[in-house]
Image: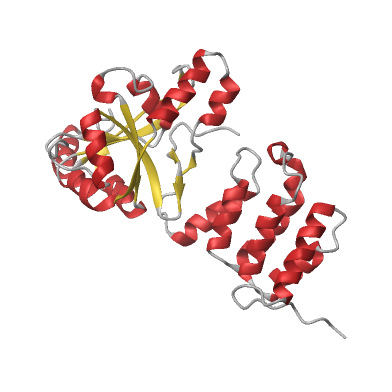
């Protein structure tokens, strides 16, 4: 699957998008203690750059080993509204030849955010043929970022060192598996749009996030998810990374999601699965029906049988 030259790729969920920054011990410890950036030691007068790409952050910080000011890597989860406010109040950091010089100066003066697209990097920090976004925040934008947008800050320095260790040892498959999952970010992210995006991702084979996606669909029970869960159940044998699952764990998660959707169609699909020729699926569905018959969750009841 080809990747567009310019595409925002990030780790995100229904309530946040994750960006990365590298800091000194002093700033990192303060941010982790307060779950936000506090001055001092953080500076509100400097532009601060946030990066959704973990590998670009590794390139920029030298795997958190370039200098003392970048020895701690923070994963910062920010609200979608904040991220999109930043993009809506941005201009590119360097003027495109097609842009009028005066118009560009006006854009610089009125927008507190800068955007630039740099080549994405691989595990060896070699440039890839597509670009990743960096977002520079200043003035009002950095104040909003520090005080309003952040939902969680996590220290991922150990992840950086672990992945780098695999790279140095030549264990590139292990290094790749250790990277945070990132996928295309749809602008205008709202809960419903997020769920629509996740349904489509559930049926794709190029990631290892299927169980997490099913959990997200369960958290937002919607009858529109039923056909996607049906297809996911059918395609499970085609996902090599789930071959470890000899006890039907993936099937169980799908059946939980169907039970919580709780419409007649959702519960009828559980009944259908109870007749499956796949023993793990059949056993999980029979157990789920037993739990529903005993009272279920969310008041779910078995669909009436036709006489």
In the image shown, does 307 or 251 lie closer to the viewer?
Answer: 251
164 is higher (above) or lower (below) than 193: above
Residue at 20% across, 45% down: 141
Q: Could you say which quadrant of the image residue 215 lies in?
A: bottom right
Q: Is residue 98 left or right of residue 205?
A: left
Q: Quadrant of the N terminus?
A: top right
Q: Is residue 172 left or right of residue 71?
A: right
Q: Could you say which quadrant of the image residue 19 lies in?
A: top left
Extreme residue in the bottom direction: 307
116 is higher (above) or lower (below) than 81: above
In the image shown, does 91 or 134 lie closer to the viewer?
Answer: 134
Total numbered circles: 0
Percent position of residue 122, x then y: 48, 22
Rendered image coloring scheme? secondary structure
Q: Is residue 131 visible?
A: no
57 is higher (above) or lower (below) than 67: below
Q: Is residue 174 visible?
A: yes
Percent position of residue 56, x then y: 39, 27
Residue at 79% across, 62% down: 273
In the image shown, does 38 or 50 lie closer to the viewer?
Answer: 38
Q: Quadrant of the C terminus?
A: bottom right
Percent position of residue 58, x then y: 39, 24
Residue at 18% across, 39% down: 138
Q: Is residue 135 left or right of residue 190?
A: left
Q: Is residue 96 left or right of residue 56?
A: left
Percent position of residue 200, x then y: 60, 51
Residue at 82% across, 81% down: 305
């Amino acid at each position: 699957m080809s990747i567009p030259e310019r595409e925002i790729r990030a780790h995100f969920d229904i309530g946040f998008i994750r960006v990365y920054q590298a800091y000194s011990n002093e700033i990192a410890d303060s941010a982790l203690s307060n779950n936000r950036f506090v001055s001092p030691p953080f500076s509100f007068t400097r532009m601060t750059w946030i990066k959704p790409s973990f590998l670009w952050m590794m390139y920029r910080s030298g795997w958190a080993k370039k200098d003392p000011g970048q020895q701690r890597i923070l994963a910062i989860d920010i609200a979608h509204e904040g991220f999109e406010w930043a993009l809506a109040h941005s201009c590119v950091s360097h003027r495109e030849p097609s842009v009028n010089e005066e118009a560009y100066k006006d854009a610089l003066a009125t927008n507190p955010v800068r955007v630039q697209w740099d080549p994405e990097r691989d595990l060896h920090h070699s440039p890839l043929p597509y670009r990743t976004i960096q977002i520079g925040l200043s003035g009002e934008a950095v104040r909003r970022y520090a005080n309003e947008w952040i939902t969680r800050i996590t220290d991922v320095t150990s992840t950086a060192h672990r992945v780098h260790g695999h790279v140095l040892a030549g264990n590139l498959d292990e290094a790749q598996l250790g990277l945070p999952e990132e996928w295309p970010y749809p602008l205008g992210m709202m809960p419903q749009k997020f769920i629509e995006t996740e349904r489509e991702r559930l049926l794709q084979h190029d990631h290892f996030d299927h169980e997490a996606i099913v959990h997200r669909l369960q958290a937002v029970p919607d009858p529109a998810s039923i056909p996607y869960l049906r297809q996911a159940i059918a395609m499970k044998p085609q996902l090599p990374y789930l071959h470890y699952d000899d006890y039907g764990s993936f099937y169980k998660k799908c059946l939980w999601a169907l039970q919580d959707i709780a419409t007649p169609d959702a519960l009828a699909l559980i009944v259908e699965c109870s007749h499956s020729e796949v023993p793990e699926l059949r056993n999980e569905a029979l157990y789920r029906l037993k739990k529903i018959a005993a009272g279920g969750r969310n008041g779910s009841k078995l669909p009436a049988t036709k006489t």
